[in-house]
Amino acid sequence: MERSASGWINGFIGVVIFAGSLPATRLAVMELDASFVTAARASIAALLGLVLLLALRQPRPVRSDLPGLVLVSLGVVVGFPLLTALALRHASSAHTIVFLGLLPLSTAVFGVLRGGDRPRPAFWVFSLLGSACVVGYAARNGIEASLQADLLMLAAIVVCGLGYAEGGRLARHLGGWQVISWALLLALPVMLPLMVAMRPASFTAVAASAWWALGYVAVFSMLVGFLFWYRGLAQGGIAAVGQLQLLQPFFGLALAALLLHETVSAGMLLVTVAAVICVAGARRFSR
């Protein structure tokens, strides 16, 4: 019981940190190339992770852990950041944030396939209801406006759910921050040269807000948030704690309105409230 409660607390902290990811990415890609933002955030986080691994003298992962770490790297280090950065070229962060309501379902599915979770049937009812609210909103208000952005976000949700579930599984024996640090290092040989190649022609021409936004997604979204998130998934269960992601759109929409002065419609708020109600039901039947 105590371990489960700790998992939910760690997971909640991770979700709060992740909530700033899309608004910050939106700020960054308004001034910087999406590929540069993706490569830079991963490279900076990887170097910080390397310092942690060396300072705390962490043992290398065993050979059997490498396939899982590759999936984590492809899902949350490369795939999700790049796909969301590209989507934010065509849509507002408030619009793309709503798609995050699909992440709990994606994570739960991969939690069953990869993590061995076995939620009760009622869990899937609530999880599907929450996702249906989000998809219904997107079909009514978003697909006609930006089909490209919506397809990119759906792809991002799939690869991110896989990366979350795989990371939660590995964190059970490697540790949360160790998983993301090793996954970041696997991507560094590709991300670092890409960052150099895609760097802006003039650094002084880029607004300070874009650099601050890049710093946030590099340090917090790419590293610190995962320290709490993967630990939470490992302690409380991938499918169960993964439902906390239904709260992420609520925090993200608030940040989008506060920092970017974007309009948050009544429909967006209703979808978010419905998703929050569904996560409460899903949590009850997650085990």
Image (cartoon, rainbow, N blue to C red):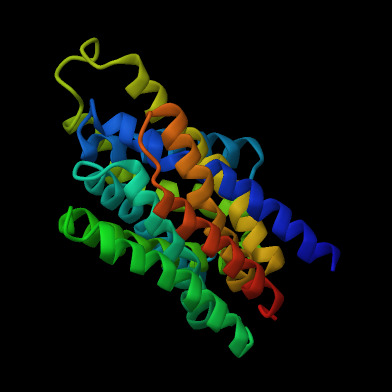
From the viewer's perspective, is residue 202 above or below residue 141? Answer: above
Please tell me which residue is depicted at 30% across the width and 62% down the height of the picture: 138
Q: Residue furthest top?
A: 204
Q: Is residue 227 above or below residue 153?
A: above
Give the image quarter of residue 234: bottom right
Question: Up-down: is 208 above or below 191?
Answer: above
- Residue 96 in sight from this viewpoint: yes
Q: Is residue 128 above or below residue 261?
A: below
- Residue 217 seen from this side: no
Give the x, y percent position of residue 240: 63, 71
In the image shown, does 250 or 241 lie closer to the viewer?
250
Image side of residue 21 versus residue 141, left or right: right
Q: Residue at x 43, y 60 (%)?
A: 72
Please state which of residues 7 and 283 is positioned toward the viewer in this rendering: 283
Q: Quick check: 136 left or right of 108?
A: left
Q: Quadrant of the N terminus?
A: bottom right
Query: Residue extending furthest front?
Result: 266
- Residue 63, percent across and down? 49, 68
Q: Quadrant of the C terminus?
A: bottom right
Residue shown at the point (33%, 23%) measured from the top left? 210
* Residue at x 35% of width, y 68% of height: 135
Name the spot of residue 164 as percent of width and height, x first: 49, 62
20 or 126: nearer the eye?
A: 126
143 with respect to 232 (left or right): left
Q: How many marks?
A: 0
Which of 9/279 is in front?
279
Q: Position of residue 139 (x, y in %)?
A: 27, 66
Most distant residue in the right direction: 2
